[in-house]
Image: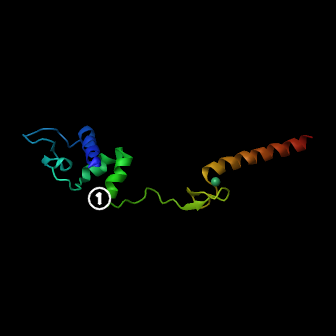
Amino acid sequence: MQNKNKIKRLVKNNCAGYLGTKHGISNYCCLQDGPCVFFAQDDGLSRCTYFENGVLPMDEKLEREYKSERNVKTEPKTAQPRVNCQKCKATFSANSNRQKYCEKCKDKNANEKSKLRMRQMRKKQA
Ligand SMILES: [Zn+2]
């Protein structure tokens, strides 16, 4: 399994519990007091809470794959309402319910507004 190798690499490089070979046990994990679950021979979908909380978030992509493989339910970090942009109709996640335009159109809108303001100012001067 491809992800398993990525997980192993992450464990080796970043997991505080992973101590390499110790007490004659290879891939020794001090939290398990035995071999790291991710280095087990069987190809089961092992899980380790310490790894999930402390190591896995370093690799966002792997975290997604890990969690979907294992059906780990995660709460979305922030509940962002999905909104259709009033200008380009693209769906985007708004930061608030009042946001009507996507980031792109928001910028454009701001530009057009300032252009309009400039035009009005020029009219007054004329
Ligand atoms: Zn838009």
The picture places residue 56, in percent across and down from the top left corner, at 31, 47
Quadrant containing the C terminus in the rendered view: top right
- Report the residue at 43% width, 56% height from top: 77
Q: Is residue 13 visible?
A: yes
Residue at 53%, 61% in the rendered image? 81
The correct choice, above or below, for 26 with respect to 44 in the image is: above
In the image, what residue occupies the spot 89% across and 44% down?
Answer: 123
Q: Which residue is found at the position 66% from the left and 59% from the top?
A: 86
> Looking at the picture, how far across and down is residue 106, in whole percent?
65, 50
Which class describes the residues within 10 Å of circle 1: few (<14), some (14-19), or many (20+)? few
User: Given the current orientation, which residue lies at the most extreme left position?
Assistant: 24
Residue closest to the eye, 86 or 51: 86
Q: Is residue 87 above or below residue 16?
A: below
**Residue that carries the numbered disc 1 in the rendered image:** 70
Q: How many marks?
A: 1
The amino acid sitting under disc 1 is Arg
Quick one: 77 or 25, which is closer to the camera?
Answer: 25
Residue 57 image offset from top left, x and y in percent: 35, 47
Nearest to the observer: residue 73 or residue 117: 73
For residue 31, say whether it is visible. Answer: no
Q: Image check: 104 left or right of 76?
A: right
Q: Is residue 111 above or below residue 47?
A: above
Query: Quick check: 100 left or right of 33?
Result: right
Location of residue 112 in the rendering, given as x and y in whole percent from the top left corner: 74, 47
Outermost residue, right side: 126
Mark 1: which secondary structure? loop
As rendered, which of 41 and 111 lies closer to the eye? 41
Left or right: 76, with 22 as reference point: right
